[in-house]
Image (cartoon, rainbow, N blue to C red):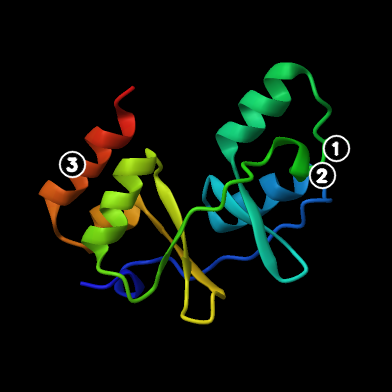
Amino acid sequence: MLVREIMGKNTEYCSPDKPITDAAKAMKKYNCGFVPVGENDRLVGSLTDRDIAVRAVATGKNPQETKIRDVMTKKVLYCYEDDDINKAAEYMCKEKIRRLIVLNKDKRMVGIVSLGDLAARSHDLSLCGHVLESVTKH
């Protein structure tokens, strides 16, 4: 099974110069805890609800004034839409992440694949269990 068969396709970039409240609104709109961050049509990072909580709120930063770039994760992790889901799952395990940005051959973002997508759409419970166990181990 390929990543494109299970990935979520409803996604958009957030600008790194916008306040983190904009990212939180996008997370609410798409019912997710993750948004890719893009600038000049290029990925420059990602932001999770945990990034907002730990790097901004817990340190007393004002959400209306704090820019996404100040709390985002700068390392961009991705897979390709034509990757096998097992390859994407192993990458998630290796990096201990729950979500991956999905690119097409032209390196354009076309979606996001999450642990939830693996669980709901892959029908491979052992794969899901393996990823969940790897991601949650410290």
Residue found at x 24% / y 53%: 119
State the CA–CA distance, disc 1 to disc 2: 6 Å
Front disc: 3 or 1: 3
Q: Residue at x 67, y 41 (%)?
A: 72
The residue identified by callout 1 is: 64
- Looking at the picture, which amino acid does disc 1 mark? Gln
Q: Which mark is residue 130?
A: 3
State the residue position of label 2.
19
Tag nearer the camera, 3 or 2: 3
Q: x and y percent of residue 125 in the render?
A: 13, 50
Q: Farthest right residue?
A: 65
Tell me if I can see residue 20 in this picture.
no
Q: Nearer the viewer, residue 125 or 38?
A: 38
Kind of residue at badge 2: Pro
Do the numbered discs 1 and 2 sit on residues whose CB atoms are within 8 Å? yes
Q: Circle 3: is it few (<14), some (14-19), or many (20+) Cα within 10 Å? A: few
Q: Amino acid at mark 3?
A: His
Instruction: Compare marks 1 and 2 and give the one earlier in the sequence.
Output: 2
Left or right of 11 in this view: 61: right
Q: Secondary structure at mark 1?
A: loop
Judge whether 122 appears above or below 89 on screen: below
Q: Is residue 18 visible?
A: yes
State the quadrant of the N terminus: bottom left
Residue 16 in the image: state x and y as whole percent. 77, 51
Mark-to-mark CA distance, 3 and 2: 36 Å
What residue is shown at x 71% (from left), y 57% (from top)?
14
Instruction: Tell whether 84 sits left or right of 53.
Output: left
Classify 10 Å Cα crowding around label 2: few (below 14), some (14-19), many (20 and above). Answer: some
